[in-house]
Image (tube, rainbow, N blue to C red):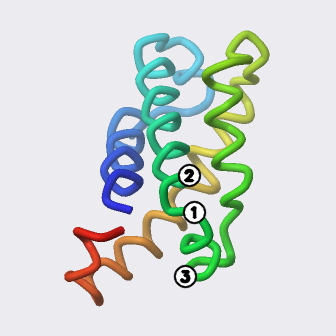
């Protein structure tokens, strides 16, 4: 769970102040963001069904699948989809995970 938060925060830091057009112009930021999304995907895989049990309002299957796309079908990745994940889906996920980790600090080592 910490990996998701750390990589998600990194993505938001990389993209702070950028709109979609700015994101498209910054290959380094796009590449770094995609790498962090791949790590988030892998962390979601490791969480397994616990993720759905604790945080059912998020698309965990989609997160896991996006990692496969990033690794195996990267030429088909749409920048619009990546941007939507960063701007619409990532912030509420991070808020929920950070709130959980604040409430249950002992879980930080196990999740």
Give the CA distance from mark 1 to mark 3: 11 Å
Q: Nearer the viewer, residue 48 or 35?
A: 48
Give the CA distance from mark 1 to mark 2: 5 Å
Q: Name the residue under label 2.
A: 45
- Between disc 2 and disc 3, the foreground one is 2
Q: Residue at x 73, y 21 (%)?
A: 77
- Give the x, y percent position of residue 32: 41, 23
| Element carrying mark 2 | helix
| Element carrying mark 1 | loop
Would you call the spot at circle 1 few (<14 residues within 10 Å), some (14-19), or many (20 or more)? Answer: few
Q: Residue at x 56, y 51 (%)?
A: 45
What residue occupies the far bottom of the structure in this picture? Answer: 103
- Give the x, y percent position of residue 40: 48, 46
Q: Name the residue under label 1.
A: 48
Q: In which quarter of the image is residue 39?
A: top left
Instruction: First in sequence, mark 1 or 3: give its number.
Output: 1
Q: Quadrant of residue 15?
A: top left
Q: Do the residues labelled 1 and 2 touch (CB within 8 Å)?
A: yes
Q: Mark 3 points at which residue?
A: 54
Residue 48, compared with residue 102, is above or below; it is: above
| Element carrying mark 3 | helix
């Amino acid at each position: 769970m910490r990996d998701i938060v750390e990589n998600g925060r990194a993505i938001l830091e990389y993209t702070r102040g950028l709109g979609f057009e700015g994101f498209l112009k910054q290959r380094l930021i796009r590449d770094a963001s995609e790498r962090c999304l791949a790590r988030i995907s892998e962390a979601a895989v490791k969480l397994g069904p616990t993720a759905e049990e604790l945080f059912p309002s998020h698309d965990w299957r989609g997160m896991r699948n996006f990692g496969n796309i990033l690794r195996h079908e990267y030429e088909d990745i749409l920048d619009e989809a990546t941007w939507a994940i960063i701007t619409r889906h990532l912030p509420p996920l991070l808020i929920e995970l950070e709130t959980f980790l604040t409430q249950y600090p002992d879980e930080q080592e196990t999740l």
